[in-house]
Image (cartoon, coloured by chain):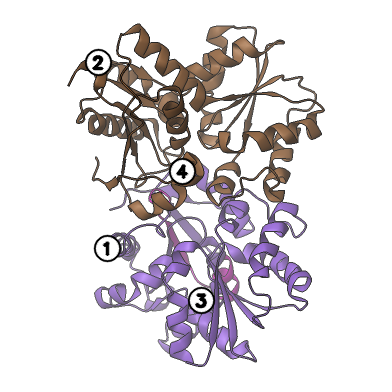
Chain colours: A brown, B purple
Amino acid sequence: MSDKSRAIGVFDSGLGGLTAIKQLKRILPSEHFIYFGDTGRVPYGTRSFETVIQYADDDMRFLMSFDIKAAVVACGTVSAVALPSLEKKFSLPIIGAISPACHAASKISKNKKIAVFATPATISKNAYNAHLNSIDPEICIFPVACPMFVPLIECGYISKDSHATRIIAAEYLSKLCGTGADTLILGCTHYPIISELISSVSKEVLGYEINIIDSGLEAAYATKTLLEEKDLLNTETACGKVDFYVSDETQNFKNTASIFLGEQAENVTKVSIG
Amino acid sequence: MSDKSRAIGVFDSGLGGLTAIKQLKRILPSEHFIYFGDTGRVPYGTRSFETVIQYADDDMRFLMSFDIKAAVVACGTVSAVALPSLEKKFSLPIIGAISPACHAASKISKNKKIAVFATPATISKNAYNAHLNSIDPEICIFPVACPMFVPLIECGYISKDSHATRIIAAEYLSKLCGTGADTLILGCTHYPIISELISSVSKEVLGYEINIIDSGLEAAYATKTLLEEKDLLNTETACGKVDFYVSDETQNFKNTASIFLGEQAENVTKVSIG
């Protein structure tokens, strides 16, 4: 196969990375994607750094078996903990989930006050703080751990009117009252699914609509830019094909995948990993 | 050590079994308990039957290293899937989480209409149905999967007035409207923490207060009865000691344990398992 027609690998600890797939398919309609969700070992966020590095290594080796031309690390935890290690071991373009979102946020923010909503594990790792302050040390960062968003989204409480999700979102957004934060990074692959709800609640709680940055969307843009730079962009007609691999039962994955993808996941195969 | 002064082993896939510990300490104040929470491999509910049986075997072997006189399986999934296998392999009294609750429910229900709230994994295994109908084939069972309760409880939304939890509880209870169910088994170790809330919401949604059965409490009563029958009850003065072992970081466990125990967990040790 020519360099350009090879697939792009995407992996995540579970289902969340499917929001990145949704954006990648939209931004790069001619590409073929191979998605690996490590559903048998999810969540990564609570594991030790050594374990996350080992898991990321396993995941990448699996994707490399498909002769991919680039890899997107949709997993926030792996992006925070294992990206330098992956870049050292594997000689292909690798796009993480954190850096593109931080660059987008720093460009859009007018007052350099940027909030981050993420899982408790990501927040405790301070991953966004380090990235944002390496872009501009004057940026003030307001991190908020949002442990209820993942279960609410996985259980389907995602409509803009979902009462329970609005109550929880209001609680998290209220932690930004008085900070003046004008931009909010959704630092977990699940969260873009409720970005409209968050935006709507932000008006009620903060009195203004906060700029929302979707990490998956920014990763998709960064992937396109990188492929262009490396002359690896597929310029053939639309492909849009995704092959899905998971490390736990495929049925569980299929049941929930449509929430994230906006369509049914076809071609799902269970594999052994690690 | 005399037979009677030996400890009682208790295990669960994670933290939930601590609600059983709370009841066991209350009902059996002279006993010494050894708790193992397999926090490194939680949750069990989504694993295959073979994996759950293997994990249960590992957990029991670990507890057996303390020369325990009896074992309480606080984990609903293990109780549903692996109890016969454990009883075959280990020659000591073993108390599961399902059978005692079913017996209590069948005694208290006046109309033989019994609802079960549990995790999706437990509901899909039909574990309570089989037990209840083996007690009385005339019992009508109304199972309701309640996926949001565990995250809500683990995130601390446990007060009787918690708005988000009341909304979710109302949604689950509304599935019992018109069934006439007079008794509700809380078939997950987490749920007794919000039993007052569920009871209060049941009045609003159903128009009557449903009888609530706490699996952990019933397991504690069953343990006492079994120890008396086997002449293994410790009749010394109050001990109330619990040694905690977990397979993931102790700090995560300690942070959340107090929600379940009603007090801080002391003596927590991390161990390797399996």
Residue linked to disc 2: A91
Chain letter for the residue marked with disc 2 in the picture: A
Determine the CA span between mark 4 and mark 3.
44 Å
Q: Position of residue A106 (x, y in %)?
A: 60, 12
Front position among marks 4 and 3: 4
* Residue type, mark 1 in image: Glu
State whether discs 4 and 2 lie on one chain.
yes
Answer with mark 4 or mark 2, whichever residue precedes in sequence: 2
Which residue, given by chain and number where applicable, does mark 1 sit on? Answer: B50
Count of numbered circles in the view: 4
Pointer 3 residue: B219
Q: Amino acid at mark 3?
A: Ala
Query: Does the magenta segment cover residue B140?
Result: no
Whether discs 1 and 4 lie on one chain: the answer is no
Q: Is residue B63 left or right of residue B254?
A: left
Work out how far the residue at label 1 is from the one at label 3, CA to CA, in angstroms: 25 Å
- Start and end of the magenta stretch? B22-42
Q: Is residue A255 visible to us here?
A: yes
Give the numbered dot on residue A46.
none
Gap in angstroms between the C-alphas marked 3 and 2: 56 Å
Residue at image position (39%, 48%) is: B40
Instruction: Tell whether label 3 touches label 4 (CB within 8 Å).
Output: no
